[in-house]
Image (cartoon, helix red, strand yellow):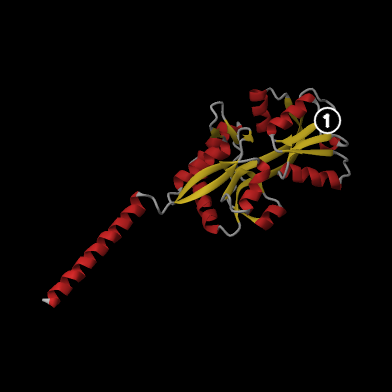
Amino acid sequence: MKKVLTLLLVVAIAFLGACSSNEASSKTTDGNSDVQKIIVGTGTQFPNICFLDEDGNLTGYDVELVRAIDEKLEEYEFEFKTMDFSNLLLSLETDKIDFVAHQMEVNEERQEKFLFNEVPYNVFPLKVTVHQDNESIQSIDDLAGKKIATTATSNAAVYMERYNKENNLGAEIIYTSSTSDITNQLRTGRVDATITTPFAVDFLNEQADAQQKVVGDTLLNSNVYFLLQKGNTTLQKRIDEALTELKEDGTVSALSNEWLGADYSVEL
């Protein structure tokens, strides 16, 4: 009798264990508990790249490209977290976000602290930008002694700081975190110039009557990447795989044409 009871008990335990295992498996598959949430840091002040449309929705080239990548990567769920550009790197360094989508160009300081993905998704042409009525500034050397507004910690700021110092330009660099503030300062003559891209100027002129124009040669024409936490090579690899597919199927080129007015997705 004891042997029978023992056998029944073993069978019952095995049955319950199997049910428990099946339930856990069901939760993993149906409840998506195996999907890892990824926090993507971006901004709301970069025209055509990451901004709020007239209905208050986050959109733009970088935003829509990240969404396309998210669709390719079933093991991840991307969630945007918006903030001022100047706070993005600190948030990445302190693990508040997993990667940055904000037209990030490579420089030594960023390479020391962070990890870039390996497949570029855009080419970022920086040019001197002035008020449309300004005829005295035709190149970067005409900025000697002038006031230049730029976004703090941006590659434009880094480039301008270096050029200013190495060429004894004597320009005054004024830092801000807002594209609208730069636009207003340039329109009202409080600053003489800024450093930005032709596609940003086109958007601002159309949407905000910015009254801007680009002048002179391209100052910096560099590839653009996503910026990740140091050591996060698994996410880096998967992003690159998805980007490669999206380039091959024409999605990246189409998004660039839609948002930037031309195909800036060509790798340099």
Residue ID for mark 1: 137
Please name whichever residue, 106 or 112, is drawn nearer the observer in this view of the structure. Answer: 112
Using the rendered image of the protein, determine whether residue 42 is visible from the camera's viewpoint: yes
User: What percent of the width, then of the height, locates residue 198?
Assistant: 68, 32
Q: Is residue 110 left or right of residue 99?
A: right
Q: Quadrant of residue 109?
A: bottom right
Q: Amino acid at mark 1?
A: Ile
Q: Where 132 falls versus 97 (above or below)?
A: above
> Which residue is at 87% across, 37% downward?
144
Q: Quadrant of residue 60?
A: top right
> Which residue is at 61% across, 36% downward?
44
Using the rendered image of the protein, determine whether residue 223 is visible from the camera's viewpoint: no
Q: Which quadrant: the N terminus?
A: bottom left
Q: Where 1 falls versus 172 (above or below)?
A: below
> Which residue is at 53% across, 47% downward?
39
Residue extending furthest toward the left: 1
Neighbours of disc 1 within 10 Å: few (<14), some (14-19), many (20+): some
> Which residue is at 72% across, 45% downward?
153
The tally of labels here is: 1
User: What percent of the width, then of the height, locates residue 223?
Assistant: 65, 46
User: What percent of the width, then of the height, locates residue 32?
Assistant: 38, 50
Find numbered disc 1 in the image and state the secondary structure of the residue it sits on: loop
User: What percent of the width, then of the height, locates residue 27?
Assistant: 34, 53
Q: Quadrant of residue 41?
A: top right
